[in-house]
Amino acid sequence: MIGKPTDETTLDRETGAVKSRQAADIVLPAGAIEGIWNPESLERVARTYWATLQRFTLGLVRVDYSPTERAVILLVPQLQLLTFKAPEYEMDRRRGIVRWRIENGVLVSARGAGGDGYLEIDIHRHDEPEGKATLNVAVEVANYYPRLGGLSRWIYTNTQSRIHVIACNFFLRRLVRRDLAASRVGHFAGPSSPEQAPDPR
């Protein structure tokens, strides 16, 4: 079940920086959460986000992986829409975070290249009575300077931003079904525990 959905997108008129946050509560049996609350599953959540984006765009957009970078490409490897540094993982018993720092790409303005922008999935776990657990799942883009934003706030809001919001909704639905894609990298493959990832800051 998905509850309390929120959708917040702001564009700073002076700097052109975008902050976008989509979040919702997902209620699942506590036993089911206990079995997947580990870095391996967090890594699979990250892969599920990218796999959902690829499925949503009918395969036109996909992600290329390297040891140090993730590239979101359109049709051919030469057309890199966004590039990110390799993901950072943080986890403890109550919170899991995966963060990709924005590097460059066709959709990034010169001001945002190599800056402090990032894409992040942030999951807070709240155990409830009667054997239930609530996961607050947020997908956030912050300090992002889109090339389209320099053309028009309306153009950005009704193209790139809207596509991302819809894709996030599909992603949340997959999490409710616990339909987690297999990791392409397998950094945390095998038995794992939250202690294997750095604590959230």
Image (cartoon, helix red, strand yellow):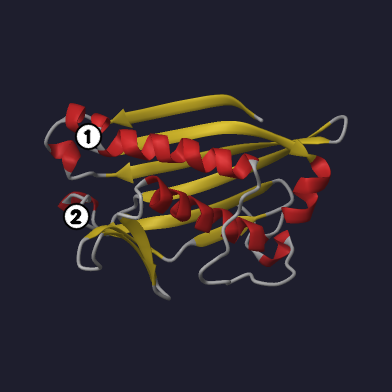
**Quick check: can you spot residue 135?**
yes
* Residue corresponding to mark 1: 156
Q: Secondary structure at mark 1?
A: helix
Q: Residue 49 at what x, y percent from top left?
A: 48, 51
Nearer to us in this view, 180 or 67: 180
> Does residue 52 appear to the left or right of 75 in the view shown?
right
**Quick check: can you spot residue 201?**
no
Q: CA distance from mark 1 to mark 2?
A: 14 Å
**Looking at the picture, which amino acid does disc 2 mark?**
Val
Quadrant holding the N terminus? top right
Nearer to us in this view, 80 or 83: 80
Q: In terms of sequence position, does the residue under pointer 1 or pointer 2 come before the other? A: 2
Vertically, is 86 above or below 102? below
> Does residue 129 appear to the left or right of 83 in the view shown?
right
Pointer 2: residues within 10 angstroms few (<14), some, or many (20+)? some
Q: Residue placed at 47% from the left, 34% from the top? A: 22
Q: Residue placed at 23% from the left, 44% from the top? A: 146
> Does residue 137 appear to the left or right of 80 in the view shown?
right
Vertically, is 67 above or below 118? below
Q: Quadrant of residue 135?
A: top right
Q: Residue 124 at what x, y percent from top left?
A: 65, 41
**Looking at the picture, which amino acid does disc 1 mark?**
Tyr
* Residue corresponding to mark 2: 106
Q: Secondary structure at mark 2?
A: loop
